[in-house]
Image: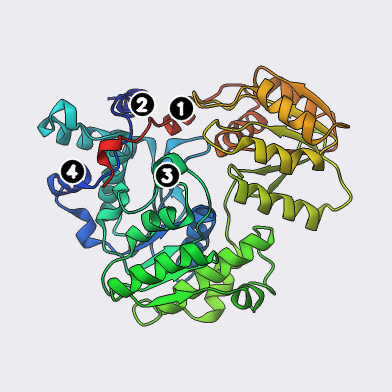
Amino acid sequence: MTYAEAIQFLYSLRTFGTKLGLENTRKLAALAGNPETRLRFIHVAGTNGKGSTCAMLESIYRAAGLRVGLFTSPHLIAFGERIQVNRRLVSESDIVRLVEKAKSLLSTFPAAEHPTFFEVITIMALLYFEEQKCDLVIWETGLGGRLDATNIVTPLASVITNIQFDHEKWLGNTLASIAFEKAGIIKANVPVITATREPEALQVIEQTSIEQKAPLIKVSIDDASASPPDTLNLPLLGQHQKWNAALAIATVRALKSQIPVPEKIIKEGLSKVEWAGRFQMISGPAGQRILLDGAHNVAGVQALRSALDQYFPDVRPTLVLGVLADKNWRAICDLLAPRAERIFLVPVGSERTVAPGELATACRVANTAAGVIEYPSLKPALEQALQQEFIVITGSLYLVGEALEVLSNEAGTIRTERNLNEWGEPSKASFG
């Protein structure tokens, strides 16, 4: 099997859609020898900030000298971003080998119960982290938590960043129902650390913690405003990142009896954290300022808008925007359009994209003075946007990944691995 064939095989797993439930993953894990039983995890769920919090935890523990696995999604450009050890992406040759191993386990499944893409890569990650003798794995959920494939592990700590509206079609249309799904990662007697502030959601987390006899630590605004989050020069900008940093610090401190980390190492790890596509500033070919942010739901866009107001209060950027149809894209337009001088609307590389024309209508209502232009794809929009001094690209992590690839790829050859981020609708029969 070549690397291209391995990626194609993973892409073919899209046929099996998305199934929420743990039976397949547990069966796959058992066939693989249950590698999860020989690893230690910090399990991270939540609506926004999961990836940033995972990156902060990884950076802290790596600074402490641990060998740290990192499992996150989606990837921005290369599939290997999802599975990293000490921030080194799993190699293409290892991906081929892991795909071949996973493929050999699939023959025992009836066609109607065939594992999905995410279930398969979850097992690939577990196998790899065991092979790599990781001291700790930072383990991000995919969708929800309770029925997410990652939930077969018993972690050292369960982390819930926050609860906001997103994926309502599958997780529920109230904060309480969404919190119920996220709180499904809470395990008996395992500490829970959360930065959730919404009372309706927090009540669910508190009740689940009581039922599981799991100690609960709540991160407050005082924690986010204390040292080191408030005094540290975090590489990840925005007030919301101080909340994520406070959450990471609280998690590390909660586990100090199992994995001691000195306070100075916590600060060192946070000061070196890297996480692409989150309020990330890069320079264009002629020195243009380009800000990329993967905000893709209302809460994420509110955080982006607040950060723009904080760092660039007098600047009205050119906005390059693309959004998926299962998001509240009208509210996203309402929040971002008034902040822009020009608005370039593009499709996201997904079957679920909102048509630029629909975004254009909403943006013109929200900002009657801005120049609003629709483009058939990102590349011509970027070519025009780069004639301006300050560009903001946002609305979807998929779009940010494509932009990073286009902007950094002088040869013009585009990888096709971003298509692996596409997922089908979860099976409703799997809920319960």
In three-dimensional space, the C-alpha distance between marks 3 and 4, rounded to whole angstroms, equals 19 Å
User: Split into 4 quadrants, where in the image is the N terminus?
Assistant: top left
What kind of element bears circle 3?
helix
Whether residue 237 is situated above or below residue 343 in the rendered picture: below
Task: Locate residue 78, reporting x and y percent.
Answer: 47, 35
In three-dimensional space, the C-alpha distance between marks 1 and 2, rounded to whole angstroms, equals 8 Å
Q: Which amino acid does label 2 sit on?
A: Tyr
Density class for disc 3 (Cα within 10 Å; few <14, some 14-19, many ≥20) is some
The circle on residue 28 is 4
Density class for disc 2 (Cα within 10 Å; few <14, some 14-19, many ≥20) is some
Q: Looking at the image, is mark 3 or mark 4 earlier in the sequence?
A: 4
Q: Nearer the viewer, residue 348 or 208?
A: 208
Residue shown at 38% from the left, 57% from the top: 180
Residue at the far left in the pictured view = 108
The residue identified by callout 1 is 419
Asked whether the residues under the numbered discs 1 and 2 touch, taking CB atoms below 8 Å apart as contact, a structural biologist would say: yes
The residue identified by callout 3 is 82
What kind of element bears circle 4?
helix
Asked whether the residues under the numbered discs 2 and 4 touch, taking CB atoms below 8 Å apart as contact, a structural biologist would say: no
Q: Which of 189 and 55 is in front in this view?
A: 189
In three-dimensional space, the C-alpha distance between marks 1 and 4, rounded to whole angstroms, equals 24 Å
The circle on residue 11 is 2
